[in-house]
Amino acid sequence: MDVYIQTLLSGLAVGGVYALIALGFSITFTTTKTLNFAQGEFISFGAFVGVTMLLLLSGLTSTVTAVPGEAASAWRYSAAVIGAGVVAGFMGILIFLLAVRPFAGKGGMNWVMSTLGFGVMLQSLGLAVWGPAPVMVPSPLGDDVLRIAGAGVRPQELLVLACAILIMVALDLVMRRSRIGKAMMAVAHSPQTASLMGINVTLVMIGAFALSSGLAGVAGVLIAPIASASLFMGMGFALKAFSGAIIGGLSNPRGCIYGGFILGVLESAVGLWQAQWREIVVFGLIILVLAFRPAGLFGRTAVDKV
Amino acid sequence: MLTLKDVDLAYGPIAAVRKASIEVAAGEVVAIVGGNGAGKSTLLKGIAGLMPVGSGQIVFDGEEISRVAPHRRVARGIALSPEGRQVFPDQTVYDNLTLGAYFRHLPNDALDAEVEEQFKLFPRLRERRDQLAVTLSGGEQQMLAIARALMGKPRLLLLDEPSLGLAPKIIQEIFEIIVSLRRSGITILLVEQMANMALAIADRAYVLETGSVTLSGTGQQLLHDPKVRAAYLGGSHGAG
């Protein structure tokens, strides 16, 4: 029994990270009909921005293979999460202006290549600055395993889950209740009609890329204490998150969140059974889902009254 | 108020409007009639900024606006109720209306007061206030599209085919609203395939044929012009 709770909780924690990134995919897809294929590098980049901030704020040099535990105090870690989000968000604005906007809405898939290329450049830049070695990052809550109903849980997993849920609930409220959220929905439905409302569509799209990339940066710092920060860690997370988004339905932000969680739990559950079969089973299931529900589990098919 | 001088509009290499010159004075209702594919909607899109102007000039209130972004044209007082309504289907009637005033950054109570004004003009929308726009009938969606455009407090209202796909009784209702809007002092540029109805309420009108203005005159002149009657009115119930 304990082992199942443990599996469920760590699945939900990783799923929360997938969900954050999947939500990011959905945000740019709905507003600009493009995806940031450098999202993986934004995760890695975010993690290292976080690492650098933890070290600088504790007055340490930035050439270490493990961040000492005392550097990750609650406030420093919070600052690192926010800082990584802001820096990644800023990079998101750059990628939109340099690699997406010249090609968006023009047909063709040039933005796929240009965002992938931006990601490669970002990774090379990261390697030049931080080197290829992974860095161990301590959790601000320490590494003592907690006992919940007999199951052993790492505190960072609970923190990741709590942060992910908090961020997503807040964003969901903003999207559904605030004027800017409704303007984003309008842009998602039709940029042309949105511009007739006096909405600055380009600005909304810039905001969407900043938000989406910011989420990736935050996800990087959240997951670093579990996966350890590496410039190569992002790709795997982004691929899983993308799969989660596809399962949930790329055009439905809530669906993407559910898809991320489903993928995380599924992966964790299969891993319990046979770790080496994990990827095969997970991606096999994704293909199966898409065969029967091409728009994803929660994807909406457009209904318009003529 | 609005002057188009030799305006060219094109979809890529395909010219849709050629050398169109049109004048709309403050307080007028001006109609543009013409058949399917004559370039009527394209012309309105050009004025609203949804299509780049190839050559020529669009002057609004004495200022050249041909290169001004669409969202800034709305802020200057030009609102378009687009062809096919284009309401936001996944948002409520109330939210659609508030989006029409998005750029005005009104406080909530002022916004509600303006929504209330629209409900007075379109009582049916009040009953549907919290329904998603997708659940409305075609006529209600048309009313919503017009009300949403009015929420921007435009001085020039562009109406693109407000009768499209609607039952005669609803069309009558919508035209009555257009007439009452004109009485409230708003300037209207109306594009219609229902030439007889449009000409009947228009001060002046232009006939557009394959992208060019071929005739212009007062609404009554065109309504009784033999060529217009033969081409667009075709008896008592004219349709394009």
Image (cartoon, rainbow, N blue to C red):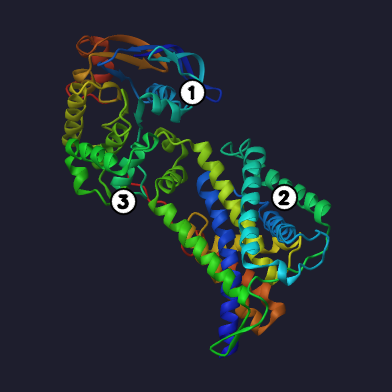
First-in-chain label (3 vs 1): 1
- Vertical placement of residue B136 versus B164, above or below: below
Q: Residue at x 68, y 46 (%)?
A: A115
Q: Quadrant of residue A63?
A: bottom right
- Vertical placement of residue B165 versus A76, above or below: above
User: Regarding mark 1 in the picture, which secondary structure is present there?
Assistant: loop
Question: Which chain hosts label 2?
Answer: A
Alpha carbon separation for disc pair 2 and 3: 40 Å
How crowded pointer 3 is (Cα within 10 Å; few <14, some 14-19, many 20+) is rated as some
How crowded pointer 2 is (Cα within 10 Å; few <14, some 14-19, many 20+) is rated as many
Query: Which of label 3 and label 1 is nearer to you?
Result: 1
Alpha carbon separation for disc pair 3 and 1: 32 Å
Q: Quick one: B31 or A47, which is closer to the camera? A: A47
Q: Quick one: B101 or B40, which is closer to the camera? A: B101
- For the residues bearing labels 3 and 1, Cβ distance under 8 angstroms: no
Are the residues under badges 3 and 1 in a single subunit? Answer: yes
Q: Which mark is residue B132?
A: 3
User: Regarding mark 3 in the picture, which secondary structure is present there?
Assistant: loop
Quarter of the rendering occupied by the C terminus of chain A? top left
Q: Position of residue A80 (x, y in %)?
A: 65, 59
Q: Which residue type carries mark 1? A: Val
Q: Position of residue B124 (x, y in %)?
A: 18, 43
Q: Quick one: B74 or B145, which is closer to the camera? A: B74
> Disc 2 designates what residue?
A119
Q: Residue at x 72, y 78 (%)?
A: A276
> Disc 1 designates what residue?
B68
User: Regarding mark 2 in the picture, which secondary structure is present there?
Assistant: helix
Q: Which mark is residue A100?
A: none
Q: Residue at x 68, y 51 (%)?
A: A38
- For the residues bearing labels 1 and 2, Cβ distance under 8 angstroms: no
Q: Which residue type carries mark 2? A: Gly
Q: Which residue type carries mark 3? A: Leu
